[in-house]
Image: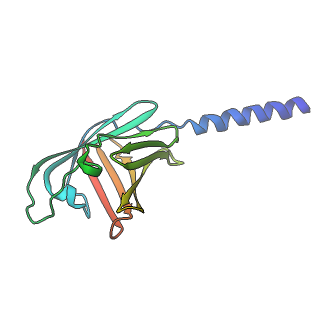
Amino acid sequence: MRSWFYAFGLASALVFGLAEQAVVPNFAGTWTLDKNKSQDLQPSYRSFERVSWVITQTDNEISIQAKYGDFVRKDLPPVRPGRGAGGVPIGPRTYKLDGRETTVDIGGTKFTRKATLSNDGKTLELVEKETFHQGTDDESTRTSTDKLSLSADGKVLTVIRHRAGWPAPQDSTLVFNK
């Protein structure tokens, strides 16, 4: 009886361990923003004719580099995308796919990033917390949460975005085509 108990326990541990190692969908590629299908775009995305994400992905991590082309909206405030505090280029956003947090300090601004795969294995949630100083002792935090999912054919990337910590919360839906 005792051996059955141990065998069942070992088998259960293996099954649950394999479930923990769910396969992350492959988001790699160059994705072009479809402004007609997207909703409630933030100014940095509305200010440019072309916006694309270049996503690289390995078994261990995912990186997203936003690229902007042809500034067209003169009625919006000037935007310098891809810049951190003091105008320092921030490069791609990189997340570990094993759920561990990563931290990057750029020009006095601390970025903490974490990726979590949904239980159904179809949505990857990317959370970035940005901590910075305003004035001498006033620390502020902004959080961006992107929920990435692919269409059945893998040609459309939908990102449900929620941003908090700005003057007002911002929600948008970004639709990209491969």
Question: Which residue in the rendered view is the most extreme toward the front?
Answer: 136
Task: Tell me the residue at 23%/48% (across/down).
Answer: 87
- Asked which quadrant contains residue 44, the reply is bottom left
- Asked which quadrant contains residue 27, the reply is top left
In the picture, which quadrant includes the C terminus? top left
Please provide percent x and percent y for residue 127. Answer: 43, 51
Task: Tell me the residue at 29%/51% (across/down).
Answer: 85
Q: How many marks?
A: 0
Task: Tell me the residue at 50%/48% (across/down).
Answer: 118
Please provide percent x and percent y for residue 173. Answer: 31, 59
**Is 62 located above or below residue 34 in the figure?**
above
Question: Which residue in the rendered view is the most extreme toward the right?
Answer: 1
Please provide percent x and percent y for residue 130. Answer: 39, 53
Question: Which residue in the rendered view is the most extreme toward the bottom?
Answer: 168
**Residue 154 seen in this snapshot:** no
**Is 42 located above or below residue 86 in the figure?**
below
How are the residues colored? rainbow
Please provide percent x and percent y for residue 147. Answer: 40, 52
**Is 85 located above or below residue 19 in the figure?**
below
Task: Tell me the residue at 87%/29% (across/down).
Answer: 3
**Residue 167 seen in this snapshot:** yes
Front-most of residues 19 and 136 = 136
Front-most of residues 178 and 41 = 41
In the picture, which quadrant includes the N terminus? top right
Horizontal relation, residue 17 to residue 129: left or right:
right
**Is 140 located above or below residue 158 in the figure?**
below
Horizontal relation, residue 136 to residue 20: left or right:
left
Horizontal relation, residue 45 to residue 120: left or right:
left
